[in-house]
Amino acid sequence: TIDDVVDVVQEEVTEDFEKMAGILPSEDTYLKTPVFTLFKSRILWLMVLMVSAMVSGALMTHFEGAISALPLLVSFIPMLMGTGGNSGSQSSTTIIRSMSLDEIELSDFFRVWWKEVRIAFLCGAALALVNFARIYFQYHDGVIAMTVSLTLIVTVVIAKSLGCILPMLAKKLKLDPALMASPMLTTITDAASILVFFMFVM
């Protein structure tokens, strides 16, 4: 019946949302699910992401000399990481949705990637322009403004590229593309943004 079809669709959409948020799918409704069951569905991904996020910390430790020489650099890292994560999430959400509706096939990989790269350059350039003006007028330092702005462009390009590559790669490997959404993607783009930033600084 139509009701049965709607129920299945709702269950599939709910499962995808849970996976995209780093939660193991639950069979029951939220209020009927015991606290410990919800804990078990969330803790695994939180543990994996916490450990993987240590890579970002290790990278910052590696570039401790640059941070000591110019402490101001640290203040830009949350913005770069956040922008990268948000950019990647936009792309992955769009790609995962398009794949679920059969609008995108694996054979479209290069078309999709090239489209996301162009979008990334436009988004990155617009963000970099605003960021350059803000930093320059606030700190009167063109070098720092340029460094942060260039990092922003590269970070957005990397994030949006990963946002389309990872879900399509997951599908190729017969995995659920939703697994490659926000949590995992954000962790990877965080490390990438720090690495790119300090490569420009050095």
Image (spheres, grey):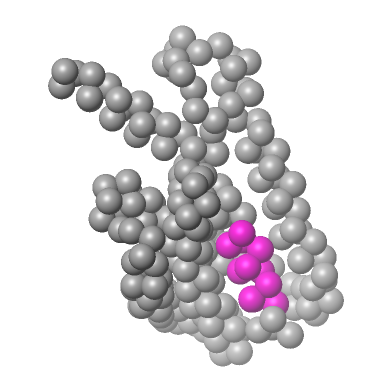
- Residue at coordinates 79% horizontally, 61% vertically from top-left? 58
- Residue at coordinates 34% horizontally, 72% vertically from top-left? 111
Answer above or below: position of 188 versus 66: above
Main secondary structure of the magenta stretch: helix
User: Where residue 148 sits in the image (x, y, percent)?
Assistant: 57, 78
User: Where residue 133 sits in the image (x, y, percent)?
Assistant: 45, 81
User: Where residue 31 sits in the image (x, y, percent)?
Assistant: 45, 12
Rendered image quadrant of residue 128 = bottom left
User: Where residue 125 sits in the image (x, y, percent)?
Assistant: 41, 80
Viewer can see residue 126:
no
Answer above or below: position of 89 versus 144: above
Quadrant housing the N terminus: top left
Q: Nearer the viewer, residue 187 or 146?
A: 187
Rendered image quadrant of residue 200 = bottom right
Rendered image quadrant of residue 145 = bottom right
Quadrant housing the C terminus: bottom right
Viewer can see residue 143:
yes
- Relative horizontal placement of residue 172, taking residue 144 as reference (left or right): left
Residue 195: in magenta span: yes
Q: Nearer the viewer, residue 94 or 167?
A: 167
What's the magenta region? 188-198
- Residue at coordinates 23% horizontally, 19% vertically from top-left? 4
Answer above or below: position of 50 versus 194: above
Q: Nearer the viewer, residue 166 or 152?
A: 166
- Relative horizontal placement of residue 134, taking residue 58 as reference (left or right): left
- Residue at coordinates 63% horizontally, 15% vertically from top-left? 36
